[in-house]
Amino acid sequence: MSKQRLSEKELLKDITSNTVHADELATVSWDKLRLESSESDYDAALKRIESLFDVAEPGTPKGDELEKLVTWVEAYEEEHFPI
């Protein structure tokens, strides 16, 4: 069964400049992202993050992609590798 993905606008709803970087306030669950997670997706995301890390500037398309990938990887790691 395929889940409908939320738009970026729906994902960012209720996030303000005061909460956007506060981990305890701006958490995103797998269910909210409506993503199917797999180890191969995780590995691909890590490789893409590595390729973007030194070239992506904040506020650019590459910077936005990097930020989304890092958020995705953090959520994956919290679910699959809890401390």
Image (cartoon, rainbow, N blue to C red):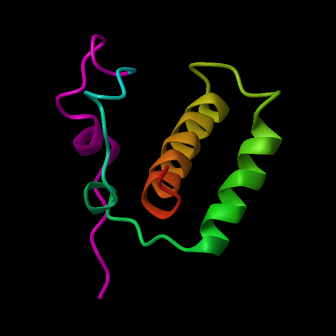
How many numbered marks does the figure carry? 0
For this rendering, which residue is in front, 30 or 2? 30
Q: Residue at x 70, y 63 (%)?
A: 43
Q: Where is residue 73? Give x, y as percent.
A: 55, 50
For this rendering, which residue is in front, 5 or 26? 26
For this rendering, which residue is in front, 51 or 27? 27
Q: Main secondary structure of the magenta part?
A: loop
Q: Residue at x 28, y 75 (%)?
A: 3
Can residue 12 be found in the magenta stretch?
yes
Can residue 31 be found in the magenta stretch?
no
Q: Residue at x 27, y 62 (%)?
A: 31
Residue 45: image quadrant is bottom right
Q: Where is residue 55? Give x, y as percent.
A: 81, 28
Q: Residue at x 32, y 45 (%)?
A: 28
Q: Left or right: 18 with respect to 72?
A: left
| 75 versus 22 height, above or below | below
The span shown in magenta is 1-20
Residue projecting furthest to the top: 18
| 67 versus 8 height, above or below | above
Residue projecting furthest to the front: 83
Q: Left or right: 49 with respect to 5?
A: right
Q: Where is residue 50? Give x, y as percent.
A: 79, 43
Question: Which quadrant of the rendered structure holds the N terminus?
Answer: bottom left
Residue projecting furthest to the bottom: 1
Q: Where is residue 19? Give x, y as percent.
A: 28, 18
